[in-house]
Image (cartoon, rainbow, N blue to C red):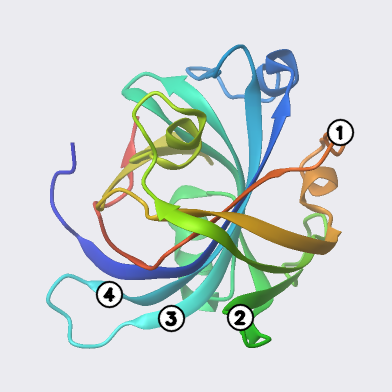
Amino acid sequence: MLGRRWLEMTWRDGLFLHWPVDPAVVDETLPEGLSVATHDGEAYLGVVAFVMEDIRPRGAPVGLTFPELNLRTYVEGPEGPGVYFYNLDADDRLGVAVARRLFALPYYRAEMSAAAAGDDGGVRFRSRRTHRGVPSARFDATYGSTGEAFTADSGSLAAFLVENYRFYAHGNRLYRGEIAHEPWTLREGTAEVRENTLFAANGFERPDGEPIVHSAERIDVSADRIRRV
């Protein structure tokens, strides 16, 4: 449950790409205190891209807007189930610096853009990691929506993949954060992925097969501060 609503923001242009993987492949990469979560026996690795719009302390009149890209999986943790982040690349020099300095979290500076692509509401999202001293990472995809809008049914695979309100990340120790928002409004999506080196940058082989693709409508989000586990 969310404590103090410390930050307010809007997320837009959301893309979820998910690949099923052997749970053992994920479990061996997790820090002490976390174990892999599965749905029908499968673990999942997800690449998630979106724009964080107007992120600001609650009550502040003006915020920052920048794209973010992460590689994630789903875990059971000491304070409940949640997302585990392998990396959080962001086009926000100050935020990345603060997260790394205070918590040694896997935030990395990147040059990013998210721009309209065509006349059908598609988005082209590009990212090139510029952070020194860490593996390089690139991502380039154009994505859009198909089908009717829906919210994920409880217990469904879509809910397992997107309806997560707690996250864990490991820096100088294990940390967790809490967020709050209405259920995602999703659509089945299409994605042309030209380049994606996030798996290699985090020590994974690229999963076999094509990803499960969802696009997400914009959503207002509140977040508490990051806390030690």
Say which of 229 and 27 sits in front: 27
Q: On the image, numbered disc 4 is attached to which residue?
A: 56
Q: CA distance from mark 2 to mark 3?
A: 23 Å
Label 2 sits on a secondary structure element that is: loop
Q: Quick check: can you spot residue 88?
A: no
Residue 63 vertical placement versus 41 (above, below): below
Q: Are marks 2 and 3 in contact (CB under 8 Å)?
A: no
- How far apart are the two marked residues, 3 and 1, measured between alpha carbons? 34 Å
Left or right? Give the position of 195 relative to 148: right
Q: Amino acid at mark 1?
A: Asp
Q: Nearer the viewer, residue 175 or 207?
A: 207
* Cα distance in 3D space between marks 4 and 3: 9 Å
Q: Earlier in the sequence, mark 2 or mark 1?
A: 2
Kindly check if marks 4 and 3 are in contact, taking CB atoms under 8 A apart as contact.
no
**Tag 3 residue:** 65
Which-is-in-front pick, marks 2 and 3?
A: 2
Q: What amino acid is at disc 3?
A: Thr
Q: Earlier in the sequence, mark 3 or mark 1?
A: 3
